[in-house]
């Protein structure tokens, strides 16, 4: 029963572990996937169970253009992160701003769609089960796009002041993981809401 | 923070202005201090939840009791359940994980210290939000204060129409906020374990406590989040006029049950797996043998985690599912008993032929083994759908899950307190008071929860505020209540031991139990930076290797 703290010899062998940022983002993505799964299950479970109209078939139109915008923003952020790794700062900043523009236009598309549904078709979150599940699922995704855009904008502002260099490429990759996740979720939401749900 | 901020003795603490000390504790991002904050706040909520339990037991002591009104009784069992699960069991286990995981893997802190502090304050303030409902819950309608719809808040009871005022809102928001805290902590634990292990600490050499907390954190990510999602839906229903659980607009009350129990059953394993972790550290040290079947223990834990994700609807046999669903959930529930049984065999295999030291931590561990086994056996009984149809919502079920939570989780936690208190404070807990605590609590526990099975079998439903005389329940309930008070007395002995030993306990030194994991290699309490030099590890028992350089474990692994 010693009382003196034991000391150890210094490390000899090479010891590499995964980056904590990526591991944490993977964990967050796992948790978020579970949340989205529950909302998707609720959406599918309540398909066709609304007691009053309007129904998805009557009012929903697939937002194909804005979907292409969002999915292509995954490509631009990927190449932005790659160009930062190679220290091409101007290219990085250009692609980064393009990503923001594409994400922003997707959000604009959602705004237009909701405006049309509310003013032209009278569908709100309390109209029927379709309204409740539609606005909460698409809204949850739009919330994640908004949060992502806020983070992307922060990086863009820092980048415009020249504060984002190669040393930050690890952080940028973590952020791009999140953005890819948001895009992947949209593939699921799009399939469920606009393909299966109609 | 200075290097010796944690090692100052009692006299020096008094010399410092208490405001400074308080400020340091409130703004700390040190994983050890946050761990202790988690534990202290949980102990506070344990007292709240315990008082609620005693009020329930006084009310049920005899038939036609008027100790509290039916409305207050509803609030008491709702608050008791919610408090004990979300604000006692979860945070206290997170507290131990916070304290021990970095020390055991030779790290200097968690991966994200500020996220760690943020998660703690979310959990703690979530608890305060729940208790604020006693004051602010009536809101505009003047209807009831604290939540009173059960800790499941089954739809449509949680809807505006049946739960007016703000009591259910406090419940929802408190669980949502503390749920986000839990997710933050789980992410932190996972990132710490994957990315901050000291050189040589391969996954196959991690202490079992670290492995099991890793699995627990993964389960938190997958199990707490459905609850958060369901709480968001309930908020949409209550505030935005949504219809998720509104049966009059086509919504489904059963969907809430599914969402709640997709969280609710894995939650049991989120709570019990860290307790398995305590057992896997304490039993070997007090048996003076390495753990029996290390790889099988890890595999069994991962297996439990997987299977436990597909057993939730055994809480719902009585709602009338079809026979295929009933059979599926009966089979999966029975299957989860297999890896759990493997674990119990391995702990007994560890004790077998060992030189067992019956110190207080070991007493509680042995209590855990027997009681958890019995709790598992009644669980297997109720996994049979027809048996469950008969006894669901009776006191048999209440006895079963309290056997798990008190007989299993709480006993394991007490073992952990007696085992790691010297590391956290630098002083030993009194063995004498510890034995009093153990025997009193053991007697009180068995009086209460062994006997509680019988009124359940006799047909006494749970959540009734009183009952008719002459059904054969009276004397049984009296015995159950007496047992509850004996347990309360044991808790007073425990708290007295914590406080007295903090000032008067024998000095512990860095390694009072002659143990083998890294946390015992640093001083007690450890300095803010944990280790003077980052340790290197060559086997599962690094301290054994240090103490026995002639015969290190690394030779055999």
Image (spheres, coloured by chain):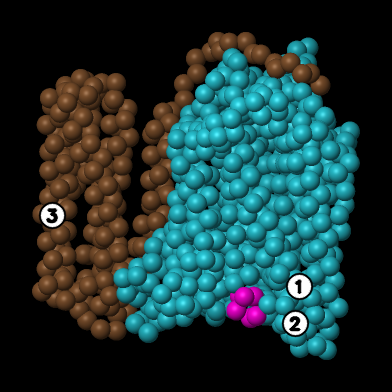
Chain colours: A brown, B cyan
Count neighbours of disc 2 (C-alpha within 10 A) and say few if under 14, some if 14 to 19, many if 20 or more: some
Looking at the image, tell me whether mark 2 or mark 1 is earlier in sequence order.
1
* Rendered location of residue A23, percent (x, y): 42, 35
* Rendered location of residue A63, percent (x, y): 14, 59
Residue of label 3 = A108
Residue of label 2 = B65
> Pointer 2 and pointer 1: residues touching (CB < 8 Å)?
yes
Instruction: Find the distance from the CA under tag 1 to the CA under tag 3.
Output: 60 Å
Nearer to me, A62 or B190: B190
> Pointer 1 and pointer 3: residues touching (CB < 8 Å)?
no
Q: Is residue A90 above or below residue B498?
A: above
Count neighbours of disc 3 (C-alpha within 10 A) and say few if under 14, some if 14 to 19, many if 20 or more: few
Name which residue lies at 12% across and 38% down: A98
Name which residue lies at 81% across and 54% down: B490
In the image, the segment drawn in magenta is B69-74
Q: Secondary structure at mark 3?
A: helix
Residue of label 1 = B58
Instruction: Find the distance from the CA under tag 3 to the CA under tag 2.
Output: 63 Å
């Amino acid at each position: 029963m010693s009382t003196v703290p034991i000391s150890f010899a210094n490390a000899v062998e090479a010891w590499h572990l995964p980056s904590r940022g990526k591991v944490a983002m993977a964990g967050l993505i796992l948790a978020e996937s579970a949340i989205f799964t529950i909302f998707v299950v609720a959406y599918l479970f309540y398909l066709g169970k609304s007691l009053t109209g309007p129904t998805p078939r009557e009012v929903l139109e697939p937002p194909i253009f804005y979907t292409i915008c969002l999915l292509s923003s995954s490509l631009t952020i990927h190449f932005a992160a790659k160009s930062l790794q190679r220290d091409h700062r101007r290219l990085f900043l250009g692609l980064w701003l393009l990503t923001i523009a594409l994400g922003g236009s997707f959000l604009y598309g959602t705004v237009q769609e909701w405006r049309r549904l509310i003013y032209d078709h009278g569908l709100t979150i309390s109209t029927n089960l379709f309204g409740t599940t539609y606005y909460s699922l698409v809204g949850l995704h739009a919330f994640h796009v908004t949060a992502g855009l806020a983070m992307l904008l922060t990086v863009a502002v820092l980048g415009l002041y020249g504060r984002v260099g190669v040393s930050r490429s690890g952080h940028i990759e973590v952020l791009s993981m999140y953005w890819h996740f948001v895009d992947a979720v949209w593939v699921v939401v799009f399939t469920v809401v606009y393909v299966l749900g109609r | 923070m200075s290097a010796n901020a944690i090692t100052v003795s009692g006299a020096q603490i008094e010399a410092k202005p208490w405001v400074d000390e308080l400020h340091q504790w409130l703004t700390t991002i040190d994983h050890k201090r946050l761990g202790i904050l988690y534990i202290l706040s949980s102990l506070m909520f344990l007292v709240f939840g315990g008082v609620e339990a005693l009020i329930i037991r006084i009310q049920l002591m005899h038939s036609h009791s008027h100790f509290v009104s039916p409305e207050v009784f509803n609030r008491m069992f709702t608050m008791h359940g919610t408090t004990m699960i979300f604000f006692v069991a979860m945070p206290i286990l997170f507290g131990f994980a916070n304290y021990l995981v970095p020390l055991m893997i030779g790290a200097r802190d968690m991966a994200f210290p500020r996220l760690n502090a943020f998660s703690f304050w979310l959990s703690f303030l979530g608890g305060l939000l729940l208790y604020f409902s006693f004051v602010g819950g009536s809101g505009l309608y003047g209807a009831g204060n604290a939540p009173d719809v059960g800790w499941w808040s089954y739809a449509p009871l949680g809807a505006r129409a049946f739960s007016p005022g703000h009591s259910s809102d406090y419940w929802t928001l408190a669980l949502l906020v503390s749920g986000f805290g839990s997710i933050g902590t789980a992410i932190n634990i996972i990132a710490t374990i994957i990315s901050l292990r000291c050189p040589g600490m391969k996954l196959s050499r991690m202490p079992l406590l670290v492995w099991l907390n890793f699995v627990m954190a993964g389960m938190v990510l997958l199990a707490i989040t459905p609850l958060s999602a369901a709480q968001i839906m309930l908020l949409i229903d209550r505030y935005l006029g949504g219809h998720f659980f509104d049966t009059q607009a086509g919504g489904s009350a059963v969907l809430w049950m599914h969402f709640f129990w997709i969280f609710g059953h894995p939650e049991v394993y989120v709570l019990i797996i860290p307790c398995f972790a305590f057992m896997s550290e304490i039993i070997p040290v007090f048996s003076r043998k390495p753990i029996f079947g290390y790889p099988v223990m890890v595999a069994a834990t991962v297996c439990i985690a997987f299977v436990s994700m597909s057993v939730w609807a055994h809480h719902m046999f009585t709602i009338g599912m079809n026979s295929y669903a009933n059979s599926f959930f009966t089979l999966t529930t029975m299957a989860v008993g297999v890896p759990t049984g493997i674990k119990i065999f391995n702990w007994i295999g560890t004790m077998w032929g060992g030189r067992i030291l019956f110190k207080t931590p070991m007493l509680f561990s042995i209590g855990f083994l027997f009681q958890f086994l019995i709790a598992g056996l009644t669980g297997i009984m109720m996994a049979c759908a027809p048996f469950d149809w008969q006894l669901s919502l009776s006191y048999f079920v209440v006895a079963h899950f309290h056997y798990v939570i008190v007989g299993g989780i709480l006993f394991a936690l007490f073992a952990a307190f007696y085992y790691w208190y010297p590391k956290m404070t630098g002083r030993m807990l009194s063995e004498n008071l510890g034995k009093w605590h153990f025997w009193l609590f053991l007697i009180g526990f068995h009086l209460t929860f062994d006997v509680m099975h019988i009124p359940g079998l006799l047909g006494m439903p749970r959540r009734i505020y009183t009952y008719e005389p002459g059904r054969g329940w009276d004397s049984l309930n009296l015995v159950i209540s007496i047992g509850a008070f004996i347990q309360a007395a044991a808790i007073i002995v425990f708290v007295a031991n914590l406080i007295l030993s903090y000032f008067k306990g024998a000095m512990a030194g860095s390694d009072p139990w002659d143990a083998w994991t890294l946390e015992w290699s640093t001083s007690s309490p450890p300095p803010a930076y944990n280790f003077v030099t980052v340790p290197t590890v060559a086997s599962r028992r690094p301290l054994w290797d240090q103490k026995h350089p002639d015969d290190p474990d690394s030779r055999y692994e």
